[in-house]
C-alpha cells in the first residue's frame, strides 16, 4: 500500500494513540457558509472511474509497495475498479495470471488540495488479508522517490480484515514514524464497517489535523510549529483510494483466499475549502 505502513500495526501497541468508541463523541467541524464544495465525485455514472477525476497508480507493483504486498494494481481494469449503481467499487481478486496471485486497484485523485475538509462515504471489505485505505500523499509523489515518511502522509482511514471494525487514522513524518516509536495516530471501533456505509472525514488546516468517523472525533494532531520534520503538511496533497492484500500488516493472520473477491465501496467523495 505504501512504504513503511507497517506503522499501522505498531500504532495500537505504542505511544501517541487514542482509542475511542461511539460513547466518546466530539462534535465535528460544521460545514457552514465558511466552506465551499470545490471537488466531488458522486459516482452517478457507470463503467470505469471518471478519467478526468482519477488516475491509476501501478508504479510500486514489483516491490510490493515496500510492504511485501501480494496484489498487482491494474490500470483501467473493470475487474478491479468500476462504477455501478452510484458506487465506486475497488475490488481485490485472486488471479492465476500474476505471480503474486491477486489483483486490485489504487486510484489517485486527478486534483490536489492544500487544507480543507475531505469526506469519503465508504464500506470496507471484511476478509482476513485485506488492507483497505483512504489516505493522502503529496501531489506528484512517487514510490521511486524513496523519501517516505519525510514528505508526509495523512491517513483518513485504514482497516485490516483480521482486526475487523478497528479504524485507524494517522499522520506520518520524519519524526513521527513507527521506527522511532513516535507516530501520531488514533483508532476507533465501528462494529458494522463492512455492512454499512460510514463517513470518514478529514479536517486539515494549517494548525491541526482531525479525523472523524460519522462525526465522532478519533484523531487530532496539533501543529506545534517545530518544523518540516514534524509537520510536512503545508503543501498540496492528493487523495488515494485502494485495497491491498497482505503486506506486513495485512497478512499478520494470513489471507483467507476463499473469501475473495473483496470490495471497498465508495458512495461519494467531497472536498470543501474555505471561501
Image: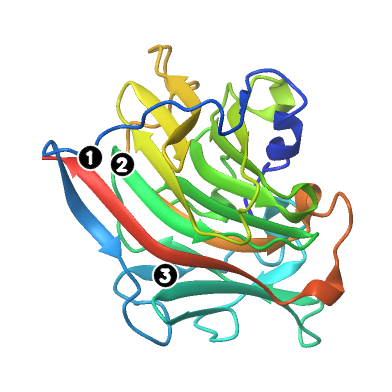
Give whichever of discs 1 and 2 has the lower sequence position: 1
Percent position of residue 194, x then y: 63, 59
Density class for disc 3 (Cα within 10 Å; few <14, some 14-19, many ≥20) is: some
Pick whichever, 148 or 193, lies toward us. Answer: 193
Labels 1 & 3 near each other (Cβ < 8 A): no
Element marked by disc 2: strand
Percent position of residue 74, x then y: 59, 77
Q: Is residue 84 above or below residue 218?
A: below
The residue positioned 59% from the left and 79% from the top of the image is 80
- Left or right, 213 with respect to 112, comes to right
- Left or right, 7 with respect to 225, comes to right
- Left or right, 274 with respect to 147, comes to left
Q: Nearer the viewer, mark 3 or mark 2?
A: 2
Element marked by disc 1: loop
Residue 55 tag number: 3
Q: Nearer the viewer, mark 1 or mark 3?
A: 1
Density class for disc 1 (Cα within 10 Å; few <14, some 14-19, many ≥20) is: few
Res 273 visible: yes
Residue 117 tag number: 2
Pick whichever, 251 or 22, lies toward us. Answer: 22
Quadrant assignment, res 275? top left
Mark 1 — residue?
31
Q: CA distance from mark 3 to mark 2?
A: 21 Å
Amino acid at each position: 500500500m505504501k512504504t513503511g505502513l507497517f506503522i499501522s500495526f505498531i500504532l495500537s501497541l505504542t505511544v501517541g494513540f487514542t482509542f475511542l468508541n461511539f460513547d466518546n463523541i466530539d462534535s465535528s467541524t460544521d460545514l457552514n457558509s465558511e466552506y465551499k464544495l470545490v471537488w466531488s465525485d458522486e459516482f452517478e455514472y457507470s463503467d470505469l472511474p471518471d478519467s478526468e477525476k482519477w488516475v491509476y497508480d501501478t508504479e510500486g507493483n514489483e516491490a510490493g509497495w515496500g510492504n511485501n504486498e501480494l496484489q498487482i494494481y491494474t490500470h483501467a481494469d473493470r475487474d478491479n475498479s468500476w462504477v455501478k449503481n452510484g458506487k465506486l467499487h475497488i475490488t481485490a481478486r485472486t488471479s492465476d495470471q500474476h505471480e503474486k496471485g491477486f489483483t486490485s486497484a489504487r486510484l489517485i485523485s486527478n486534483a490536489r488540495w492544500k487544507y480543507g475538509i475531505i469526506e469519503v462515504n465508504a464500506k470496507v471489505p471484511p476478509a482476513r488479508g485485506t488492507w483497505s485505505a483512504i489516505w493522502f500523499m503529496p501531489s506528484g509523489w512517487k514510490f521511486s522517490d524513496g523519501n517516505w515518511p519525510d514528505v508526509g502522509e495523512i491517513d483518513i482511514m485504514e482497516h485490516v480484515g483480521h482486526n475487523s471494525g478497528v479504524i485507524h487514522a494517522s499522520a506520518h513524518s520524519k519524526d513521527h514514524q513507527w521506527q522511532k516509536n513516535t507516530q501520531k495516530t488514533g483508532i476507533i471501533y465501528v462494529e458494522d464497517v463492512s455492512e454499512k456505509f460510514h463517513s470518514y472525514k478529514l479536517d486539515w488546516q494549517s494548525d491541526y489535523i482531525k479525523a472523524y468517523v460519522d462525526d465522532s472525533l478519533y484523531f487530532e494532531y496539533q501543529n506545534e510549529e517545530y518544523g518540516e520534520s514534524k509537520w510536512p503538511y503545508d503543501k498540496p496533497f492528493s487523495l488515494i483510494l485502494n485495497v491491498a492484500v497482505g503486506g506486513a500488516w495485512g497478512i499478520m493472520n494470513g489471507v483467507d483466499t476463499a473469501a475473495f473477491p473483496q470490495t471497498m465501496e465508495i458512495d461519494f467523495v467531497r472536498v470543501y475549502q474555505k471561501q
